[in-house]
């Protein structure tokens, strides 16, 4: 029976499993899940843990912010641009094989990153490290969907989704602890023993997964088009704020995306063995859950990237204290994700995703002051007042992320699990990049506006200090009170700067609340049926 027919009749196509790992698969798919989420945690942690180390990297290489930011951007860009292609590789050549290749690549180039002698070598190794992450993520999700029976799959996907949120949340705190206690090199070295351990256990207990009847062909033209298209879009979104959204390089990249993406879609419709089965996007559950997932990760950037800025540069927390302050959110996420995974088989995805997105929206509005329960983030904000919205947002993320994953994977036939997981992961990474680009641009715009108008009402401040502050903010180099001016600023002006910065951050959370509300409305298109 063909794989597609087997899927339509509700039967699972045969799984290609080596005989010596077959007993492990039958005995404990949960043990396999532990191995898979260890790899997932490692690659997602590297998306955020490096941010805390940027000042130390700048000092270590005696380089500027422009070069140091590429240490973060190069990884995200390589990660996001390759997941669809590498997910399809897993469908054809084996998901376990791609997982092992990705783990080996990620571990090797983590070591290389830690040993880098120049900033340029570090950036190059981060690109190669991102390729490994792009292989691990879709392979990991595909294997989770494959090894668990339907009655356990929702819970397993809930844990998988919860780990992804946890890794993003604990990254800044863990990175701060490592940098404070040692050297930035160890944020990369720490991956090496973890990677080796995951490879060892993956070789022993993770089964190979491929459909023996799947066509062993690869749409090379599609690979080139989707890679160029995704690279152009992600690069333009990452660098738009730096070069200017109307600059030639950014507009050129958007134009390249506008040309290559339609060409890719046309190619996929016409070829007999496409890289992506575009017919999946005719399924309402598939496209609506992917779009909702993208909107969710957009909102998560307000919390996991902008909130650490507020905690450290406005409230004056150390990186470690800022990371620990975010832990209640991570805990709520971890608690709710497995629960929502179990409930999705009973209640369906729509109610859970809508409820989760509404909780995230209300939590973001709470922090911005829109609901009047909290007067917005300000220099006097205490930790106790942050815990309720943090718990609400964490629970909302946990309730949303697992049903989104389950709904997407439930619409895909097993021989296309890698493709489906690659698409889902790519939509999520696009949400990350869009969140950084849009929220970052909004934050910078409001900073310039607030500080410029605020300084006009400060006649007692010397003109040269005003000029230095305005110069910093217009270059995008001012978030907190700059150490170079801290001693020379009047106490009242230093306090006002923190207030103006807080007001700008509140605006980003207002937008995040609206985007989460849009995600709740998008979830209306998800089927009610379990």
Image: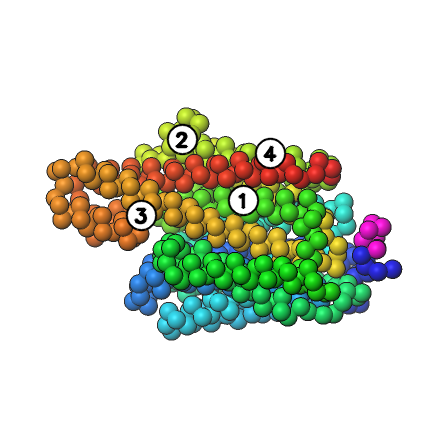
Cα distance, mark 4 to mark 2?
21 Å
Please tell me which residue is depicted at 52% across the width and 58% down the height of the picture: 258
Q: Is residue 365 magenta?
A: no
Disc 1 vs disc 3: Cβ atoms closer than 8 Å?
Answer: no
Could you tell which of marks 1 and 3 lies nearer the N-terminus? 1
Residue 159 vertical position relative to residue 202 in the rendered view, above or below: above
Quarter placement of the C terminus: top right
Please tell me which residue is depicted at 29% across the width and 44% down the height of the picture: 448
Nearer to us: label 4 or label 1: 1
Give the residue number, with chain letter if any, for mark 2. 369
Give the residue number, with chain letter if any, for mark 3. 479
Q: Which residues are magenta?
A: 5-11
Cα distance, mark 3 to mark 4?
34 Å
Could you tell which of marks 2 and 3 lies nearer the N-terminus? 2
Nearer to us: label 1 or label 2: 1
Q: Is residue 440 left or right of residue 95?
A: left
Cα distance, mark 4 to mark 1?
14 Å
């Amino acid at each position: 029976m063909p794989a597609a027919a087997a899927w339509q009749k509700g039967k699972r196509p045969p799984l290609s499993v080596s005989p010596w790992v077959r007993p492990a698969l039958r005995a404990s798919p949960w043990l396999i899940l532990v191995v898979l989420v260890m790899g997932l945690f490692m690659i997602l942690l590297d998306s955020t843990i490096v941010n805390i180390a940027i000042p130390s990297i700048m000092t270590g290489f005696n380089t500027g912010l422009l070069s140091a930011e590429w240490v973060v951007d190069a990884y995200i860009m390589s990660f996001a641009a390759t997941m669809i292609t590498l997910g399809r590789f897993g469908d054809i050549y084996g998901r376990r094989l791609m997982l092992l290749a990705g783990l080996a690549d990620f571990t090797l180039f983590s070591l290389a990153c830690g040993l880098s002698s120049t900033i340029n070598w570090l950036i190059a190794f981060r690109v190669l490290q991102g390729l490994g992450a792009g292989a691990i993520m879709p392979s990991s999700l595909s294997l989770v969907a494959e090894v668990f029976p339907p009655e356990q799959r929702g819970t397993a996907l809930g844990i998988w989704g919860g780990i992804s949120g946890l890794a993003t949340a604990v990254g800044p705190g863990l990175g701060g602890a490592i940098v404070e206690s040692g050297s930035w090199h160890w944020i990369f070295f720490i991956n090496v023993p973890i990677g080796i351990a995951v490879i060892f256990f993956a070789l022993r207990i993770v089964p190979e997964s491929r459909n023996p009847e799947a066509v062993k062909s690869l749409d090379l033209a599609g690979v080139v088009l989707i890679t160029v298209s995704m690279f152009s879009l992600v690069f333009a979104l990452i660098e738009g704020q730096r070069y200017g959204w109307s600059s030639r390089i950014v507009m050129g990249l958007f134009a390249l995306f506008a040309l290559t993406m339609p060409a890719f879609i046309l190619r996929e419709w016409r070829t007999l063995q496409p890289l992506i089965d575009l017919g999946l996007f005719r399924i309402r559950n598939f496209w609506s859950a992917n779009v909702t997932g993208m909107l969710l990760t957009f909102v998560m950037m307000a919390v996991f990237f902008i909130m650490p800025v507020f905690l450290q540069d406005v409230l004056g927390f150390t990186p470690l204290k800022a990371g620990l302050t975010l832990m209640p959110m991570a805990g709520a996420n971890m608690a709710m994700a497995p629960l929502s995974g179990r409930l999705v088989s009973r209640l369906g995805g729509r109610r859970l995703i809508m409820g989760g997105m509404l909780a995230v929206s209300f939590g973001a509005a709470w922090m911005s002051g829109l609901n009047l329960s909290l007067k917005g983030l300000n220099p006097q904000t205490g930790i106790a007042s942050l815990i309720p919205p943090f718990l609400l947002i964490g629970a909302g993320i946990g309730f949303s992320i697992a049903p989104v994953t389950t709904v997407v994977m439930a619409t895909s036939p097993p021989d296309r699990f890698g493709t489906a997981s690659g698409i889902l992961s790519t939509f999520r990474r696009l949400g990350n990049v869009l969140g950084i680009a849009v929220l970052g641009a909004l934050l910078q715009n409001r900073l310039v506006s607030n500080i410029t108008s605020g300084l006009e009402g400060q006649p007692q401040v010397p003109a040269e200090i005003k000029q230095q502050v305005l110069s910093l903010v217009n270059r995008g180099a001012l978030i907190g009170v700059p150490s170079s001016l801290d001693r020379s600023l009047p106490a009242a002006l230093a306090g006002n700067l923190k207030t103006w910065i807080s007001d700008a951050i509140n605006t980003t959370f207002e937008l995040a609340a609206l985007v989460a509300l849009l995600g709740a409305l998008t979830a209306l298109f998800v089927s009610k049926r379990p």
